[in-house]
Amino acid sequence: MATRSTPPTLVLLVRHGLTPTTGTRLPGRARGLHLSDAGKAQAEAVAQRIAPLGDVAAVYASPLERARETAAPIAKATGNRVRTLADLHECDFGQWTGRKLSDLRKKKEWARVQRNPSGFRFPKGESFGEMQVRITDALAQLRARHPGQRVVAVSHADPIKAAVAHAMGTHLDLFQRVVISPCSVSAVALTDDGPLVLAVNAVDDLKRLVPS
């Protein structure tokens, strides 16, 4: 007897828009960081890129303000509300939270973060391995909740990079080679036979994701 297959779930992973500290500090899970004016414009623009794709069953976001603010116009454009999913959270950078990147790059541990992230844990924070397990669990939850549907998940650069690396079968030590820009879209189709990576860091139109 043939086994019934589950239709693929298409997850559009969106990084949040620019904030006043993007590129200068490691904000982590600190509360109170909102989108800048440029970030708000990016969020509106990505919403208009996603809307033409067709039915979006749900829009999820990390608990942080910058992610929920990015998700809001996407939800509006697709006729949804923003749902919070804890496993889409930013990496817990522990004692590095809020530090200037220029200072962190001077630390001897910085080389491990870039070259051997699988063996690094942030002081009093999360390890990259734990972060990757968490974000892949988030995708599994979305697959279970929305079989055969299209969903949007707004998260952060490192979790999305880790999710893409896992979907491509790339070792976590190489995940820093993936670039995820603010309000870029990375598309992963979750199938019974494993994930299919359809787009990474897309910052232009998404017409190629529309079924022909």
Image (cartoon, rainbow, N blue to C red):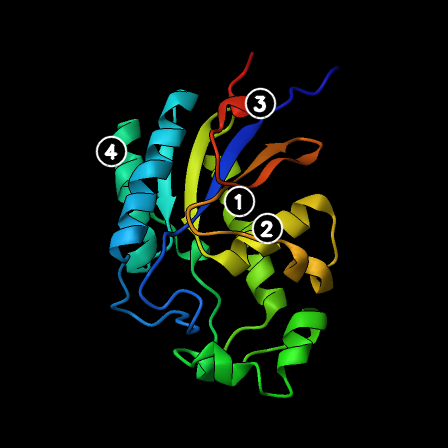
Crowd tier of the residue under label 4, counting other residues whose Cα lies within 10 Å: few below 14, some 14–19, many 20 or above: some
Residue labelled with disc 1: 139
User: Is 72 or 138 nearer to us in this picture?
Assistant: 72
Confirm or deny contact between disc 1 and disc 2 (CB under 8 A).
yes
Q: Is residue 210 above or below residue 129?
A: above
Q: Which residue: 53% across, 30% down?
A: 9
Q: Which residue: 49% across, 85% down?
A: 103
Crowd tier of the residue under label 1, counting other residues whose Cα lies within 10 Å: few below 14, some 14–19, many 20 or above: many
Q: Is residue 23 left or right of residue 115?
A: left
Q: Is residue 80 above or below residue 160?
A: above
Q: Secondary structure at mark 4?
A: helix
Q: Secondary structure at mark 1?
A: helix
Labels 1 and 4: the sequence-earlier one: 4
Residue labelled with disc 2: 163
Labels 1 and 3: the sequence-earlier one: 3
Front position among marks 3 and 2: 2
Report the amino acid beneath label 1.
Leu
Front position among marks 1 and 4: 4
